[in-house]
Amino acid sequence: MQLNEELLKKIVISGSIIGIVFLYWFAGTITLDPIASLEGIPKDTEVKLTGEVLSVSQTEKVAFISVANQAIKITEVVVFKDHDIWLDSGDYVEIVGTTEEYEGKMELIASTITVLD
């Protein structure tokens, strides 16, 4: 059997469609495990952090949240916001975000914050 241009094109398109369906199916099953601290985690890594809110300070466009996790490590979380953040000290939260280095310290740039019961 000889591969001509038309047959090769059909094989490539079929393989691409199967690959996209495979990625879409498995993308929903990827989960992040909560981390204990940001120490040793590379910059621009997506992580999940759970812990108790110690303090919240807000400016017009940014909120800074201090979170203590189970290992009693305090992590600074930055939230770029378009509305007020309704968190209080003592709230237990799950935060998903990306690690960034700022002034020599690692911090978490939050993408989602969920208050846990």
Image: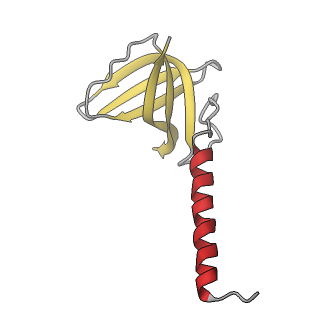
Q: Position of residue 29 (x, y in %)?
A: 62, 39
Residue, far left:
60
Q: Can you tell which quarter of the image residue 55 is in?
A: top left
Q: Give the colour scheme shown.
A: secondary structure
Q: Can you tell which quarter of the image residue 15 is in?
A: bottom right
Please say whether residue 79 is visible from this viewpoint: yes
User: Looking at the image, which residue is at 58% across and 54% down?
Assistant: 21
Q: Is residue 72 above or below residue 83?
A: above
- In the image, taking residue 105 as reference, residue 84 lies left or right, namely left
Q: Can you tell which quarter of the image residue 32 is in?
A: top right
Q: Nearer the viewer, residue 29 or 47?
A: 29
Q: Is residue 77 above or below residue 23?
A: above
Q: Nearer the viewer, residue 85 or 43?
A: 85
- In the image, taking residue 60 as reference, residue 38 lies left or right, namely right
Q: Position of residue 97 (x, y in %)?
A: 49, 37
Please say whether residue 42 is visible from this viewpoint: no
